[in-house]
Structure formats: C-alpha cells, structure tokens
Amino acid sequence: MKILMMERDLAELKGIEWFLKNYLSHDLEFLAITDAQSLIEEIDLFKPDVLLLEMELLPAQLDQALTQYKIPIIALTAEPLFQQAMKAIRIRAMNLFVKPIPLEQLKTALMSIQPQAENDVVVIQNSSLYDDLFLQSERRFSLDHQSFFLIECAQFQNNLKLYEWLSDLPIFDNLTLLPLQNRIIGIAQIEDDLQLSKQLRLIMLESRKSFEDEINIALYTGIEANLLTMYQSCKKALSRRFYEGYSHILKSSDSLQIVRLDPLLTPDEQQLWIDSLEDGDLATVKTLLYRLTKSTTHYNQDDVRIHLTSIIAQIRRYMMKYQLQQLSHFEVKYRNLFHLILEHPILYAIVQEFVLFIQQLMDHIQNAQKQSKADYAELAVTYIEQHFQDPELSLPVVAEQLNISANYLSNFFSRKRGIPFKKFVQQYRLQRAAELLMTTEHTISTISELVGFTDHNYFTKVFRAYFQSTPYKYGSVSNVGVNEIGFSISFTFFNSAQM
C-alpha cells in the first residue's frame, strides 16, 4: 500500500510512518510532505493508494483537483471546527480524525481500503492446492519464505464474511486463501517469523472490529509435509478451543496433555450433587463444575461432555421434585443447556451456562419458599386432613409434597402449632375415630383402619390414653347419650304437638 501524508509536524509524520509500517504490510510505501505546494505533483508521481491530509494546510483551490483523482482521503485536523468538517466533506474524505490521531481507528480505516494496484497482493483459490488437499497428494509443500495457517471463526456462519474480508486485507504482500466450509486455509509469503506473528495478531484484532466475532489461527510449525498433513495438524491445534477459547494463535507443534475422566458420577458424587442442590449450596456447585476447566488439567473432551450429561440428570431430578419442568422458561433453558453440552465448542462457556441455570433454579425455589413460609404448617394440616386414612402418612411424605426438608417442616410445625407433627397426626386420627364411634356402627377394628391405624391393639392403647376410656366404652356411652337426647327431643316435640 502507498500512503501519501501531508502534515506540518515532522514528529507526527515520523510517528505515523513507524506505526503503520510496524502494523501493516512491511513493504508499505510512505511519502511525507509538509505543505500543499507540491501535493498534486507528488500525487501524479507517487500514485498513492490513500491520502492523509491535514486540513489546515489544504487551500480551497485544490478541492476540485483532489476529487478528480478518486483516491481515498483521510482528513486530519487539530481544530475540531465546523469549517474543517465542511472542507473534509468537499474533498469527499472518508474519515475526519481530530488530533491526537487515534491510531487504532486510523489503522482500521486504512485496512478497509483496497489498494489500486492489486497485482499479486492476494491470490484466491489456487486449484492445484485444492487438488493436493482433497486428493491427498504426497507432494511436499515448501515452507521456504512462506507459512501455512488455518483460520476458524467462533460463529461458523461468518466464514464467508471472514473470507471476503481477508481477500481485501492489505496486510500481506502475497496471500493465498482456500475457503473451506467452516475454516479458511491461508498461505502467506513471509520474510521473518516476527513479522508474521504481528500480521496474524493484527488479523485477529481487526476481525473482531469488522464483524464482531472471535477467531483462532492455527499456525503450522512442523517440518515440511504434504498439504493434507499440514491441514490436519492445524485442525488438531484448533480443537484446543474447547479448553482455551478463542483469540489465540495456536502452534501446531504445541500439544496438550489430555487426562481421562470417569464420565459417570459415582454414588457419592450423585449424593453430593443432590445435597448441594437441596441445600442451595451454589459454592459447592461451582467448585464441582469449575474443576473441569482448570488450566493445569485438560480432561478428554468426550469424557467431559458425558460427565456433564450425568450432572444434568441430577438437575432434572431436582427440577421434577419441585415441578419446575412445568415452567416453560425453565424447560426451554434446560433443553438449551443439554444441547450446549453436546455441541458448544468451548468448555468454559458450557460451565458458565450450567452455573447460571442452577443459580436461577435455586433462586426460584428459595423465593417460593420465602413467600409460602408462613403457610407451611397450614399446608401440612390440610394435607393431613385429606390423607389421614393413609397408613403411610408421615413427616417425610408431607415434607416432600411441600418441597421442603423433613427437618425444616418438623421444627417449623412444632413452633407454629405448639405440638410435634407426629403427635398432631395421632390426635387428629383419634378425634376422627371418636366421631365414627359416635355416628356409625362400625366395629372398632374397622374404625381403626379407617383412620390410618394398622395395629388394632395399638389403636386401643393410644385411644385409652387420650380419652381416658376404651373405644368400646366410649362408643357405648356416646350411643346411649345420642339415643337419650333423641328420645327427649321426640317426647318434647310429641307433647308440644298434642297441646
């Protein structure tokens, strides 16, 4: 790329030239002038690809001449005044930068300009290279003054955008691009490794600005081999995204030590997950999940994904216990998390979504428990009234129905009602038994079964202790009392009718 810069400050000229040559193509040609007298002449001789012009030095009579050249212009000014902005508009400047010049923005603007002379700057789609790659040619690819690298977007659908953007990028003198479905092969002419590293880093930084996506670049650093071998080596290096994420330049010769992981949860691990979820212990949950992402240990990718599906099974049980699967937004998030486990390319992102989802579940349950805390005793009483006939009725059964722990319900019920849960159930059953003794002719054994007692002798024992009478005597006295009352009422009614 050829850049002609008109700037009166020599130090500014030197600084801009150093910056651009350091970060753009190493053969960038830079011409600096300090006044407008020779501007047109220098344009004709130098034939620049872009003009960097200080507006304060530009006379009005040159406006028309500059627009006829159709050369991209970047305007610079030390005076952010309306007049300078109008002058930049008249010469059709693509940008107007106010001093001190924002170097990163200047670099981005220059990289968006396609040089007028495109001879051998970018060579696209060399068919013989495709043949070598797909037909698995044994011909060795020369690494003499050229490098082989593979680029991959975080969002695969941006691959075409990346390819088109790279095709117009004025960084390399000679760049061959081979677009594939999800990746792009790059072959660049280089002078030294340091310059190559700067150029690849620049691609990474600028691509993020251009289409808001992260990329990884795998650089082949092995011995000369055929194209397929080099491609496979770089592709393997790109798989490190699972552990390291994006925005990395990965060398094919560097490798990770992969450790096997038992993908299934042991009974102790299952219980730990159950207890952590029930207790709302998010700290333990984070510890269990984040150990998978330690930078010092890299577990086998397939093992990790299976392990996470084992964990999500425990989360499913937790959701079903509290009937959270019936809430559509939680069900959708659960299914999305399951797909992330199977498909997402980065482990840390999966773990982050795991933690966020579990935290949302815990928060929902804790909020629900706080809102209904005052009603737990009454809800328990209602359940007892509806199920007292069930011999299996117990504190754990009721606690499970209320989605709280048995210990919590026991303590809360005792404080709220002033009587232990078990004693309350027994007394309620005895009171219902007394009603049946008074109003029915069922046998004592039948009545004991109807109110939830399975042992008739035990029923008689606790009934005597509570009413100071056996069920038989209680029923006989009650029936006599009812008959006497009924006779008295009938007699009174008969006498009243006679009168």
Image (cartoon, rainbow, N blue to C red):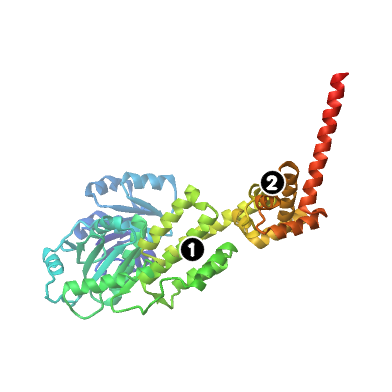
What kind of residue is marked 1?
A: Gln
Q: Is residue 137 visible?
A: yes
Identify the image quadrant of residue 306: bottom left
Q: Quadrant of the N terminus?
A: bottom left
Position of 387 compared to 126: left or right? right
Along the line of sight, which residue is nearer the eye, 152 or 485?
485
> Residue placed farthest to the top in the image?
499
Labels 1 & 2 near each other (Cβ < 8 A): no
Which mark, residue 358? none
Q: Which residue is mark 1?
A: 314
At a point 44% along the width and 47% down the height, the residue shown is 81
Residue 224: horizontal and vertical position, in percent? 18, 79
Residue 437: horizontal and vertical position, in percent? 74, 46
Q: Is residue 244 visible?
A: no
Q: Nearer the viewer, mark 1 or mark 2?
A: 2
What kind of residue is marked 2?
A: His
Which mark, residue 442? 2
Q: Is residue 497 above or below residue 383?
A: above
Q: Is residue 46 above or below residue 142?
A: above
Q: How many numbered marks are there? A: 2
Position of 97 compared to 434: left or right? left
> In the structure shown, which secondary structural element does the residue marked by tag 1 occupy?
helix
Along the line of sight, which residue is nearer the eye, 368 or 476?
476
Residue 141: horizontal and vertical position, in percent? 15, 75
Along the line of sight, which residue is nearer the eye, 135 or 436?
436
> In the structure shown, which secondary structural element does the residue marked by tag 2 occupy?
loop
